[in-house]
Image (cartoon, coloured by chain):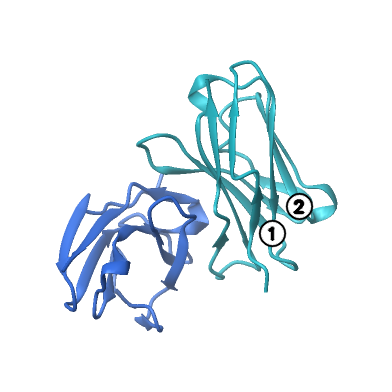
Chain colours: A blue, B cyan
């Protein structure tokens, strides 16, 4: 099974960029990489997705390596409300993994 | 646009009882997914509907779980009989198609006592 690997937890100072890495070395060529986050006990919230090119939207930026084996989600100016568990998921395979618990520190 | 709606938000039942969870996807979304998160563990895929058809049910844990999607609209997930290890949060998500982000519901927290 293709799996993802993410750090269990990370801290980030408020106002600084949060860079969340994900390894997805067995992702297949046509699988998108999706990022979601779950704040407390709410349902997962879509953030961004990409296939090969880097992507940016109002929430975040996504950097995908050329070999597509890893990606980095960037929250450019983290706020306290960004504290959540962030999941990298190749959703064609419906696998979420355990995610990274990001804590934004005042 | 209304989001994905799940009912009930919480359910507490006794072991051996039956519970039915309901999910109303975003109107027009053909794809509907069920996931669950048991205590302390990762979110795991259960199954995927495309309209009324089960596209992939490889994540269903056993035959005590039955999912249906009548007419390709809302979906139900029935657990019968419920066991203690079924406790967790059950999420539903919908999407328009491949390459689209999923929209998740707020989940149903199931507690089996």
Q: Position of residue B39 (x, y in %)?
A: 40, 34
Where residue A102 appears, as percent x and y from the top left, is: 24, 59
Dots 2 and 1 on the same chain: yes
Query: How far across and down, in percent of the image, does residue B78 sit?
Result: 69, 33
Q: Is residue A84 left or right of residue B3?
A: left
Disc number for residue B25: 1
**What numbered label is drawn on residue B42?**
none
Q: In this orientation, does residue A65 appear?
A: no
Mark 2, chain letter?
A: B
Name the outermost residue toward the top: B16
Q: Are marks 2 and 1 in contact (CB under 8 Å)?
A: yes
- Name the residue: 16% across, 67% down: A12
Q: Please give the name of the residue rendered at 46% of the width and 63% of the height, measured from the top-left corner.
A: A45
Q: Is residue A86 left or right of residue B102?
A: left
Chain of residue at mark 1: B
Question: Going 79% across and 51% down the picture, which residue do you hit?
Answer: B52
Q: Left or right of B35: which side holds A5?
A: left
SS for tag 2?
loop
Q: Quadrant of the N terminus of chain A?
A: top left
Quarter placement of the C terminus of chain A = bottom left
């Amino acid at each position: 099974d293709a799996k993802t690997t993410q750090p269990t937890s990370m801290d980030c100072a408020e106002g600084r960029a949060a860079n969340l890495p994900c390894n997805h070395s067995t992702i297949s060529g046509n699988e998108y990489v999706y990022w979601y986050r779950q704040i407390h006990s709410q349902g997962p919230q879509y953030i961004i997705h990409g296939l090969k090119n880097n992507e940016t939207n109002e929430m975040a930026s996504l950097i995908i390596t050329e070999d597509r084996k890893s990606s980095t989600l960037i929250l450019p100016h983290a706020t306290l409300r960004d504290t959540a568990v962030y999941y990298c998921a190749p959703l064609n395979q419906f696998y979420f993994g355990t995610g990274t618990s990001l804590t934004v520190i005042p | 646009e209304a989001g994905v709606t799940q009912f009930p938000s919480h359910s507490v039942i006794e072991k051996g009882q039956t519970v039915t969870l309901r999910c109303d996807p975003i109107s027009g979304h053909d794809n509907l997914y069920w996931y669950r998160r048991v205590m302390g563990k990762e979110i795991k895929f259960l199954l995927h509907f495309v309209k009324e058809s089960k596209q992939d049910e490889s994540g269903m844990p056993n035959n005590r779980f039955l999912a249906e999607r009548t007419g390709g609209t809302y979906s139900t997930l029935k657990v019968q009989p419920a066991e203690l290890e079924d406790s967790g949060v059950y999420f539903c998500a919908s999407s328009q198609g491949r390459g689209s982000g999923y929209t998740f519901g707020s989940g149903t927290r199931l507690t089996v006592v």
